[in-house]
Image (tube, coloured by chain):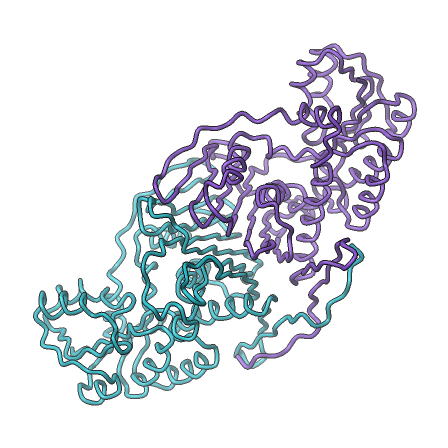
Chain colours: A cyan, B purple
Amino acid sequence: MRICIIGNSGHGLTILPELDRRQDIQVTGFCEGYPGEPNRTFRQEVVEKRQHKVRWYHSYRAMLEEERPDLVVIDGIFGEHGAMTMEALRRGIHVFVDKPVATQLKELDELEAVARNSSARLFAMLTMRYEATFYTARRLVEAGSIGQLRMLTGQKSYKLGKRPDFYRDREQFGGITPWISIHIIDLILWIARKRCISVSSLQDNHYNHGYGELEMTSLCSLQLEDNILASINSDYYRPKAAPTHGDDRLRIVGTEGILEVMNDRLTLISQDEAREMELMTPPDLFADCLRRIEMKDFSQDMDGIESTRISLLSRQSADEGGRLLFREERMGKRSFSFVLEEGVRNYAG
Amino acid sequence: MRICIIGNSGHGLTILPELDRRQDIQVTGFCEGYPGEPNRTFRQEVVEKRQHKVRWYHSYRAMLEEERPDLVVIDGIFGEHGAMTMEALRRGIHVFVDKPVATQLKELDELEAVARNSSARLFAMLTMRYEATFYTARRLVEAGSIGQLRMLTGQKSYKLGKRPDFYRDREQFGGITPWISIHIIDLILWIARKRCISVSSLQDNHYNHGYGELEMTSLCSLQLEDNILASINSDYYRPKAAPTHGDDRLRIVGTEGILEVMNDRLTLISQDEAREMELMTPPDLFADCLRRIEMKDFSQDMDGIESTRISLLSRQSADEGGRLLFREERMGKRSFSFVLEEGVRNYAG
């Protein structure tokens, strides 16, 4: 299997463990995600340490044309994930792309159509599904250990540190909600197995250490089918002295118990007991992607599109200051209505 | 000082420590909050243990007329807090009332006008302000220990257990948001010292063990001045095996640090260190109320009205499915506009 890689800006190097396990995978080409993108980690890990013979490109189109890989790892500048993904899918090349798979709703719709018509498949790097805590939590929910799901609340909190310049620019970066909150949005949709019927979000980009348009906080409220409530709070304010880079959390409230992931631990409080749960071993993210392609198991390949869509709609809700409502169309294809600030009525407060 | 008490359904007996400390307080009358309200705790604690000579009433109006107390403790059925409070304020009797101070917005506006025109003062039982963790957190925020406030997220999770019948009825109970979430809403407003500029909430009353209209989950998103974001998630699903009745939390994100209350502990992560903070000793709730009356310190006596208003608007937002926006009127008196679902536009999804 021949693979090419575009960019080195996100989770692309989650392919490394599988590169080590499988001798039949050859990385044949690398294209920078944007002019001047640092690629030292890629160079060290793939070229020097693992001795892949890589041709270097400045144009990903030229690389795909020249190398004709079986699969491309897309880890470029976030605002170009969509174009890069469509280019590959149109050529029948499988895609393993970092989330969000696009940063504009219109482009996402186009990408979805391309994906549905392509012989190749699209897999998003929904990395948190493959962390033992969240993976085990989902299995326990499936097994009925907390009864009926009623509310899910999650958190991402990161140290800001030094970020690439493109983080300053909404068009290139996409925003904190599609870049960070999307992980929890995805976990929530994946665990609840329900569709989202409304989103209402807030975000802010003040006090951002001069990082242009970069938002530092984001708060998303999702209403899922069966009126399951969900919220996600994300921020880039995790202080330097914090013991870890990130503070990821998820609390899952069911009618018969509460599961919670915090500090890389999973606890369950049921009607009978409160205890820390032993963690299951999830598969490797990229191994799972390859397995699905080889087994033709495409049950999850649209999940990245859906989680991207909800995150972009959350961003839109925050930008426009309203709540977005979804409704089902007769055709089964989804459309939604947006609650605007028109039609306001006064309240004598 | 002569005081009377109406009802025994909430936090009224937070007066006990002060009854013990001050010999000049006499409880002279008790009126049930609703016909058949259990009052065993009141009887045991006030009449038997502390030997107050109490006259018993079925009508709080008759009691206020007859006893003419200096202060009345209002702990009746929640839907009647407003009427009871106005009755007392109109008679010039100070009020120490459980939150919410009213359960309807129209009644709350009327109550606010009565309070502004009364010689007597209104104090709400904002009990969580007087817990050492939250009290200390506010002091640390005031002292600048986490820089500029950017996001506050809080939680209330309770065991449902057995509740009085009136919890089944929205009109009598008021709802989970004005009864439970209000505590965190109040803490957020009190700590941030900012006004709320929009609310968007969700709630649900399925799987409620036959408790009629009682909501089991509530999720409120508040946008404060300076675009400080806030959210509150509340539920009645805390499982039987949980070690405590409630699981109260508050996480306060600032530009220079994060404060967090969880498990009755307060931790601070700053740029320099991560540690558990020593807790300050807050004053007693009722002692503080009496001190304020005696010192004529009325700086906080409208806070209960404000926190009640935000909680009732959150409930309305959830009931109507939109986001409520506030705006400042030229007169300085506040009014707000409500974003309705009219004016929707379609999105070709």
The part of the image, by quadrant, that contains residue B35 is: top right
Seen at 33% across and 80% down, the residue is A85
The C terminus of chain A, quarter of image: bottom right
Seen at 57% across and 65% down, the residue is A198
Is B324 placed left or right of A97 in the picture?
right
Spot occupied by residue A276 in the image (x, y as percentages of width and height): 35, 39
Q: Is residue B322 above or below residue B155?
A: below
Instruction: Identify which residue, B290 or A151, lies in the foreground.
Output: B290
The part of the image, by quadrant, that contains residue A5 is: bottom left
The N terminus of chain A, quarter of image: bottom left
User: Number of labelled discs?
Assistant: 0
Is A243 placed left or right of A104 in the picture?
left
Spot occupied by residue A134 in the image (x, y as percentages of width and height): 36, 53
Spot occupied by residue B43 in the image (x, y as percentages of width and height): 73, 17
The part of the image, by quadrant, that contains residue A16 is: bottom left
Instruction: Identify which residue, B101 or A197, lies in the foreground.
Output: B101
Is A5 placed left or right of B99 in the picture?
left
Instruction: Identify which residue, B215 or B348, lies in the foreground.
Output: B348
Seen at 80% across and 21% down, the residue is B3
Q: Is residue A71 above or below residue A319?
A: below
Q: Is residue B145 above or below residue B201?
A: above
Spot occupied by residue A226 in the image (x, y as percentages of width and height): 57, 60
